Amino acid sequence: MGRVVERVAVLGLGRSGDAVVRWALERPDTSPSDVAVFVEHDNPRLSATAEILRAQGVRVELGVETVPDEGWDLVVASPGISPSRPLMRSASRLGVPVISELELAYRHSVAPFVAVTGTNGKTTTTALVTHLLRTDGLDAVSVGNIGVPAIAVAPTTGADAIVVAECSSFQLALTLDFHPRVALLLNVTPDHIDWHGSLEEYAADKAKVFANLGAGDVAIIDVDDPGSAEWVEPVVDRGVRVVRVGLSGGDARVEDGMLVVDAGEGDVRLVRVVELLIRGVHNVSNALAAATAALLMGAAPDSVRAGLRSFEPIEHRLDPVGTVDGVEYVNDSKATNPDAVMKALTAFGTAPLLVLLGGRNKGNDFLPLAEACATRCRLAVLYGESRPELEVAFEAASAPFLVTDTMLGALTLASESAHPGDVVLLSPACASFDEFSDYEERGRHFADAVVRLSGEGR
């Protein structure tokens, strides 16, 4: 690894693109004049960031659709830029590698990687793997979609540490050499169809997490999910060992209420399902996958047991944010597709649910979600850019709903309709970009509003 890159074109200037530029500026063999940034959009935030970088000698062009052919050694593309965008099409014609920031980080790292991907559950599972390793005293760091770009951390992480990477389909689509020691595929359900073009392309990009695995590496695949289970045979056929996660019949499974994992050296009985602090059947599967990865990376069973018992819900993912007048409010803002919401609906036993749904659709069909809400939810409040699509689905499913314009308006309607013992769940099934900069901002606004409810009473 540690390749010398002389001239780098960076596409996009969000969290990922900015991290790539700062990595390049810190390299002794790269001068600011060897780094250029190209962005299709222009707004005050981008302009402010661009001025800071220009003051350091970096070329930044905003509002452009073409990457000039100027002898670039490498193009690093931000994950939000679809392959269909003019800037990406332009870059693909240059005849040089177009890679993701994840791929760049791997190329310049010496630490082993654990890679976690799937439509849903990535963040929780990545955080849990890291928590289990750290509970054992191992040096582990979480990177990727979980918040810290891999390029900001992985190149300076030593060979005796472990990088646990949450890998999006966008990042994996632009990998070439990426080779984790352990790779987890949690599930594959419709999402980001607008970016990938089809469910088949989306699934294939997810499965690129296995592309470079060989003898000595391990793939952990959830076989309860049909979308991920179909990759078991192709991976096995390449000579890669697969550990199957299946609640009732996998190598990692549940027996008599106990999490049991066979990672290759016989069954290890861990903890009872009721000891987990994270809610939902899907999180039992996530815990099995994470425990398997931790055991494979050297964590002792006792440490894994302790870590499973102590791991708490992460922010924005089935995260309890308060109880007001006997009504529990839960922030699940990271549920940005229908499948994530349907999994969340299983997490509250028989408590009546009022769910807040809305935002920007990513090419998904809402009818299965509406049908699930018809049987599980007392009420749905629909809002945002996708409200008309949601209304059509909920009417077709004869599911009860109210409508409003904004997420905070939806919270107000739900709080006015809720009774003691109910759960008000923000689990939007959509991206946040019609109203917020990201799901984190959406979740924080929800949590802050619940605090205000607590102070004011309903």
Image: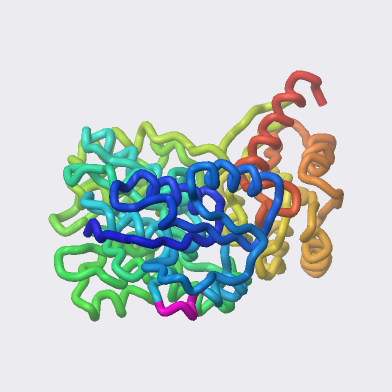
Quadrant of the drawing holding the N terminus: bottom left
Residue 93 falls inside the magenta stretch? yes
Q: Nearer the viewer, residue 253 or 105?
A: 105
Q: Where residue 285 sits: x, y (%)?
A: 40, 54
| Residue displayed at 70% across by 37% down | 446
Q: Quadrant of residue 318?
A: top right
Residue at position x 63%, y 58% in the image: 62
| Colouring chosen for the image of the structure | rainbow
Of 377 and 41, the residue lying toward us: 41
Q: How many marks?
A: 0
Give the x, y percent position of residue 321.
62, 31
Q: Is residue 355 visible?
A: no
| Residue 177 visible | yes
Q: Which residues are magenta?
A: 91-95
The image position of residue 331, as x and y in percent, is 62, 40
Magenta segment, prevailing SS (helix, strand or loop): loop
Locate residue 305 relative to residue 19 in the image: left or right: left
Residue at 72% across, 26% down:
324
Decide: is 349 above or below 62. Answer: above
Q: What residue do we see at 41% from left, 68% from top?
A: 72
Residue 135 x/y as whole percent: 27, 33
User: Quarter of the image containing the C terminus?
Assistant: top right
Residue 88 is inside the magenta segment: no
